[in-house]
Amino acid sequence: MSSAASTNDQYTVLVVLYEGGEAGKNNKNILGCVENALGLPEWIKENKLEDRIKLIVTSDKDGDNSVAEKVLPEASVVISQPFWPFYLNQERIDKAKKLQLAITAGIGSDHVNLEAACKRGITVAEVTGSNVVSVAEHVIMQILALVRNFIPAYKQVINGEWDIAAIADNAYDLENKHVGVVGAGRIGVRVLQRLKPFDVHLHYYDKYRLNESLEKELNVTYHSSVESLVQICDIISINCPLHPETEDLFNKRLLSLMKKGSYIVNTARGKIVNRNDLVEAVNSNHIQGYAGDVWYPQV
């Protein structure tokens, strides 16, 4: 808050989170839901800030009549998250005359128009590194599910079927496969670290090269272009942020350069992969499979 502001001022903090339901009510460790509100109500009470902070917590964020839209003009702080983003576009930033701080309760601020925020002097912050282990482990799970053809096998068992050949036809060992990471930041490096014990050939592309000692430790090959990376890898893990250079990065041209029968895991942002081009590549069997925890085009 502005240091020039009066100590008697009250600030409205708008927090947009997903509904936790029964799980949220019963498990206080699920902080990112409406029911637990990131622990903010308790923090405000402990610090005796009830008179200073007006906390509005809601999941209602879409449409002109939504709670978030109505509260926005009076909000000094807006807190959102990648799983339930409240998009601060140019129109909303213009509407939020009192906004001083936009926080992502997680990693990534691509739901904020950074240029508009910068012009207004709005601080944009995120909780860097908050879920890097969870995402890295999720990547490994999805790689194994794809390569071992787990989902079709699971469906067979549930349906009382037992067609071993149909599953084995597209099930492989991960060992000796070439696995590439696009974006070797906090998450990408942890993906590489977790893949090393599988005795795979590791590759990565990033605008900034890892230090030599870490490359040797991981026995990983650096590629100076994403085009070089995708042509050699059997599996690609996307772990880069969404920005103008990465939006639609995996389009028809780049997908066509990938090895026939390769796999993609996208735990970054949906808009990094062109949905229509991906569907075409999968339907033609050029791409064997895709896994992700992101939706196109929003997150």
Image: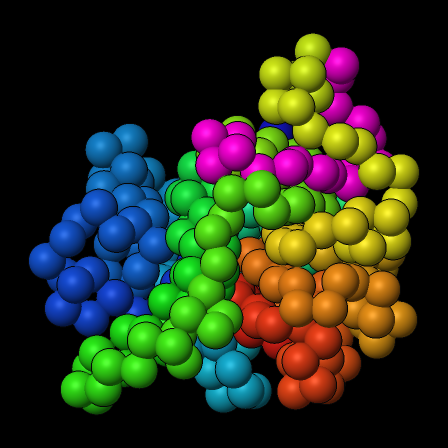
Res. 61 in view:
yes
Quadrant in which residue 24 is drawn: bottom left
Q: How many marks?
A: 0
The quadrant of the image that shows the N terminus is top right
Q: Residue at x 70, y 85 (%)?
A: 284
Residue 188 position, x and y percent, is 61, 39
On the image, the x and y values in percent for residue 29 come to 22, 46
User: What are the residue bounds of the magenta stretch?
Assistant: 196-212
**Residue depicted at 49% across the width and 88% down the height:** 65
Q: Give the x, y percent position of residue 26.
A: 10, 58
Residue 51 in the image: above or below residue 67: above
Question: Based on the displayed image, in which of its 4 quarters is residue 288 positioned?
Answer: bottom right
Residue at the far top: name it.
213
- Residue reaching furthest to the front: 165
Q: In this view, does 54 lie to the left or right of 230?
A: left
Work out whether residue 115 or residue 68 is closer to the camera in this orientation and state it.
Answer: 115
Q: Where is residue 182 shown, x and y percent of the image? A: 71, 47
The structure residue drawn at horizontal position 66% and vertical position 45%, both measured from the top left corner, is: 178
Q: Is residue 79 visible?
A: no
- Towards the viewer: 122 or 38: 38
- Asked whether, in this view, residue 273 is left or right of residue 79, the answer is right
| 138 sits to left or right of 294 | left
> Is residue 214 on the magenta stretch?
no
Q: How did the renderer colour the structure?
A: rainbow
* Up/down of 103 relative to 294, above or below: above
Q: In this view, does 104 lie to the left or right of 235?
A: left
Residue at point 87% right, 53% down? 227
